[in-house]
Amino acid sequence: MCEIFVLFDGYSRQINNKIMEANCTCTLIKAQKNIIVDTMTAWDRSRLEDALLRHGILPSNIHYVVCTHSHADHIGNNNLFTNAEHIVGYSVQQKTSFYDKQIEQEDYILCKGVRVTATPGHTHEDVTVLVENDSVKYALTGDLFEKEEDITNPALWQNLGTLQLRKVQALTRLRILKYADWIIPGHGAMFKKTSVQVAFLEKQILETT
Ligand SMILES: [Zn+2]
């Protein structure tokens, strides 16, 4: 049994051509292990602690921290979780030990129903957390998907991604959307996958160079 609790919905807003206001989606997974996915900014420490407490979890009870990539708004409170193994992109670490998990080649299974899979594109080392609960499938994608709107307006993810990996990201977005029933994106609310969305992404692959 895996339970998913989105603690905070991410968002992003362009204020002007120099400033974007953004914070990431932060999600708690209660399964055989307690897992937190993306830890927001360093300024969110106390509200993150409060949110966990409402679910009966202390930072010391977290077994895995997964940061979908290493941007500052996704890693800000990793040091709250000093009992946990930290997976930041493809890097897997506990204290000063780094483990060679080859995530880029093989999914890393954290516990029954929860695994980490490589989904590069926004950066060179993005990961997505895949959760399967009672045959309902969730993908916690970080910025592989910024928000639901980026399906119909691909500039939203393309402008923030790695230019050389744009085609890779387009292919990966389709792979994850086909897999999942629900997408939990990096900077927007959770949304349910539709066949219309799949068709959009198939078309985008042909258009992406
Ligand atoms: Zn982000």
Image (cartoon, helix red, strand yellow):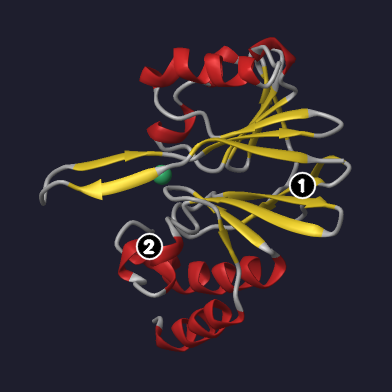
Does dot 1 land on a helix, a strand or a loop? strand
- Which comes before the other along the chain, label 2 or label 1? 1
Does dot 2 land on a helix, a strand or a loop? helix
Instruction: Answer left or right for 163 relative to 40.
Output: left
Residue identifier under label 1: 115
Compared to residue 38, the image places residue 174 above or below, namely below
Is ligand 1 within 8 Å of the beta carbon of the residue shown at mark 2?
no
Q: Please report the residue visible at 56 percent of the width from the left and 74 percent of the height from the top.
A: 171
Name the mark on residue 157: 2
Type of amino acid at the residue the image marks with label 2: Trp
Instruction: Answer left or right for 44 relative to 144.
Output: left
Label 2, label 1: how many angstroms apart (C-alpha)?
A: 24 Å
Do we see residue 170 in this rendering?
A: yes
Q: Please report the residue visible at 55 percent of the width from the left and 68 percent of the height from the top.
A: 173
Compared to residue 50, the image places residue 38 above or below, namely below
Where is residue 78 drawn, in percent x and y? 54, 21
Compared to residue 97, the image places residue 14 above or below, namely below
Q: Residues within 10 Å of mark 1 (few under 14, many from 20)?
A: some
Quarter in which the N terminus is drawn: top right
Location of residue 182 (image quadrant):
bottom right
Type of amino acid at the residue the image marks with label 1: Arg
Compared to residue 150, the image places residue 5 above or below, namely above
Name the mark on residue 125: none
Front in this rendered view, residue 96 or 24: 24
Quadrant of ligand 1 in image: top left
Do we see residue 104 in this rendering?
A: no
Instruction: Answer left or right for 123 relative to 87.
Output: left
